[in-house]
Structures are given as C-alpha cells and as structure tokens.
Amino acid sequence: MLDAVVVGAGPNGLTAAVELARRGFSVAVFEARSTVGGGARTEELTLPGFRHDPCAAAHPLAINSPAFRALPLERYGLEWLHAELPMAHPFPDGTAAVLARTVGETAASFGPRDAGAYRRLIAPFLTKWDTLARDFMSLPLTALPRDPVTLARFGLAGLPPSTLLMRRFRDEPARALFSGLVAHVMAPLGGFATGAIGLVFALAAHARGWPVARGGSQSLSDALAAYLRDLGGSVHTDYEVKRLDDLPPARAYVFDTSPTALARIAGFGNHYGGYRYGPGVFKVDYALDGPVPWTAKEARAAGTVQIGASSAEIGAALRAVSREGRAPDKPFLITVQPSVVDPSRAPAGKHVFWAYGHVPHGWTGDLTDSIERQLERFAPGFRDRVLARATAGPPELAARNANYVGGDIASGAVSGLQLLLRPKPTLFPYHTPHPAVFLCSSATPPGPGVHGMSGHNAAKAVWKRLRQT
C-alpha cells in the first residue's frame, strides 16, 4: 500500500508529492492529461517552432516561493530568465510607468509627486520580504509566523481595499500601475484585501523579479516531476480519476483539483456548495513576425506588459465583468512576451506573445477583436505582425484544465472572505470530510498563482496524519 496518492500533476500536486517523498513516504501521482504541468505547461499552439505557455508564463510568485526555493530544481533543468524590466505599464501618449527591480527606478517612473509615497509604502516590507512571504503564504495555521509584527503591519496596509491604499498616490502613473497589479487576480479594486494583492506583486518584483523559465513554463513542471522520480515517487499520465475506487490503495489521498471535482470523485455531496467561482478569461497566443511594436520604449524591454489607459478604465473593465456580467469594451489586458529574453521560444527573428482579458464566468463570446483594438492603441501596427493566433475562451480553458471552472484561472473567486478563507471558512482548509482525503489546489490558501505553496501547506497536514496512523 502506498503512503499517499496525489491526483493532478499541476505545480501544487507535484509540490505536495515532492514534500511527502522527501520525508520518506511512498507517493504516486495520477494525471488525466498526457503531460504534467496543469497551469504551467508549454505547447506549440500556433505554428511549428513557436512554443507557447497556455496559461502561466511569467513567474513572480514561483521565483519567490519558499517551497520552490527549498528544492534543487535548477539541477533538473529549471533556469530563470529576466527581462531588463519585470513589468511595464504603457500609456497611449507613449510614456510608461514601470515595475523595475529597484524601488528607486520604479518610484521615478511615477513622477516626483508620488515617488516618495511609493518608497514609504514599500520600504517597511522589502528588507523583510523572505520572512514575510513565508509567513503570508503559510497562512492559516500551517506554521507560526516568524515575524508577527511585520505580518501585522502588512495586514494593516493590505487588508483594506486597494482604492483606499491608492489614495496615497496623486497622479495616474502610480494609480494605473497599482490598479493593474490588483487586477491580476480579477478582483474588483474596492474589494477586501485587494491592497495586499498589489503589494505582494510589487514586492516580489523588487525582491527577485518577474522571470520566465527558459524553454517555457513546462520546465518548472518537468523539474518537479524529475525530482519526484529521483526521490522514488512515480507519475502516471493519461489516467483520469472519476471516483476514489479508480486509485490504488493508499493511506492518504491528495487532490490538486477544484473543490467541485473533489466532491464528485469522493462523494462529498454538497460539502463545497458555497464555494464561488470567479470571472473567466479570454486568452490569445500569438506567433509574431517580429517584436510587439510598443510606442513606449519601456514596454519593449519588459517581460510583462499591463494594458489599461488609466485606473478608471481598469476599474470599469473589472466592474463590467464582475458586477454587470458583460465583456468590457476596453478590456484590461495582461500580456507576456517571453521571447524578448528567451529567443529559443520562436524561430530566428520571430516572437511568441500572449494576452488575456477578463470576461464573465462561462462566457462563450469572442474577445479577439477587443483585445487587438486595445493592443493597437499602445502598439500601432501590431496586427500586421501576427502570423497566427490561438484563442481560448472559458469553455476551451475549462476543457484544457478541469480546475479552470467556467474559465476561472484562479480556481475560485478571489474576492471577499474567500480571498483568505478558501475553500471554506476554516483553519483547516486542506482537510475534507474524510480524514484520509486532502485538497491541495489553488482553491486552498494562499490561493492562485504558480508557487506550489498550497501543495506545500497541504503536505504538512498529510504527513501529520501519516505519522499518527
């Protein structure tokens, strides 16, 4: 009998398996798709030789993850590549605010009236970032805080709505860039704890950047799987699990799935009936004949580029999706251009590029034209460089990754109390009604993103159980 079986080979499932195998437990992972990866995959979606990341491409949380930093993933082929700028936020007039590696360069891009305010906001946390990240990502009670004072200060700054925090800024460059950081998790700007979201992304960039993985996000997943095999674990692909009886006998079962899927497979009925799924996204992967022709020079040097003309425009796009149930006319876009720093991702002189905008949950329309009209505002001539495109709305995303219910790449709404207390209001979010069954997906704290910490935290609960039985 195995000690543990993990269902789902995304970053969280693989991390949970690695943490258990490192402690001497026998582990097997079962994945429905033909390759491991979940939200961290790389595929030729458009033309031969163009390697795209179907979901996550830039990895500020992965490179800062306490779980990943404790693992020897570089020995298994993972290499982080950094663009000159982690992120740029261009404006229609050709200027841009930037999220640079240094606080000073970032503050300078906001202009003199907001430079000091940004420094004062970031300074108390940056020197203590590693401890803060570990404490923040280990909540709830999987580990006692190492620096409870700094964690409390972070809570005071981040728990109020981001709209309150942004009152520190007087001009649009800082307000728009920070609004875009919050919008990465598709939360309304006025929501609970949205200030913390913006702070985490900013601090992560200053601490270690927003890199891409050489060769694509698949490199991270492959490194985790290779390390697991070296530890004695096994990975089985093309193995869809529809009920617990489909799995071999084990002392514990760990699910890197949505709560909905877990309830169906394990027979938990309506146990997660109150869990809310959030807006979806519409994503376009591009094969380009050259680099994106950004008007702002800063955007040409950035790995990630946020697209929103103002904080008001970004806020309106989020409201259209989350409150009005419609696709926005001017969607806020998150774009990544991996081949700016990794030319191996495309044939010589060519580029890969992806962009997505937020849409209502389960939306079945086509946002391609709206996305490209937005891109043309900031990069005139963009359409002329498109060789091929691959589009994916909520139905396609959900078919590609079952955790993306209704196209929700966060695996659950990141708003209200569910931002912190997911999948249910409890101090034991990784436990389920069955004492031998655990949940480790992004539906558990610390939530969405490629960081493995949900799997790391869940593994702690699992090995406590295994040591008691």
Image (tube, rainbow, N blue to C red):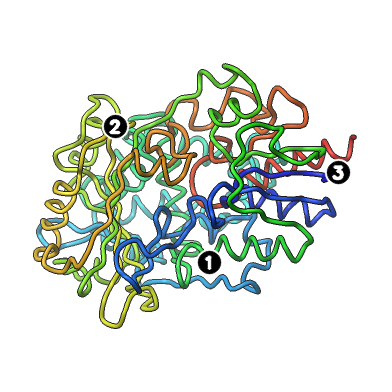
Extreme residue in the bottom direction: 348
Q: Tell me if residue 86 comes above or below residue 419 in the rendering.
A: below
- Residue 289, by quadrant, is bottom left
Residue at x-position 56% and y-position 56%: 36
- Residue 97, by quadrant, is bottom left
Q: Which residue is mark 2?
A: 360
Residue at x-position 14% and y-position 66%: 295
- Quote the CA–CA distance across marks 2 and 1: 31 Å
- Expressed as whole percent of the image width and height from the top left, the position of residue 419 reads 48, 32
Q: Residues within 10 Å of mark 1 (few under 14, many from 20)?
A: many
Q: Which residue is mark 1?
A: 219
Residue type at mark 1 is: Ser
Looking at the rendered image, the quarter that the N terminus falls into is top right
Residue type at mark 2 is: Pro
- Quote the CA–CA distance across marks 1 and 3: 31 Å
Q: Tell me if residue 54 comes above or below residue 386 in the rendering.
A: above
Kindly report which numbered mark, 1 or 3, lies closer to the viewer in this rendering. Answer: 3
**Secondary structure state at the residue bearing disc 3:** loop
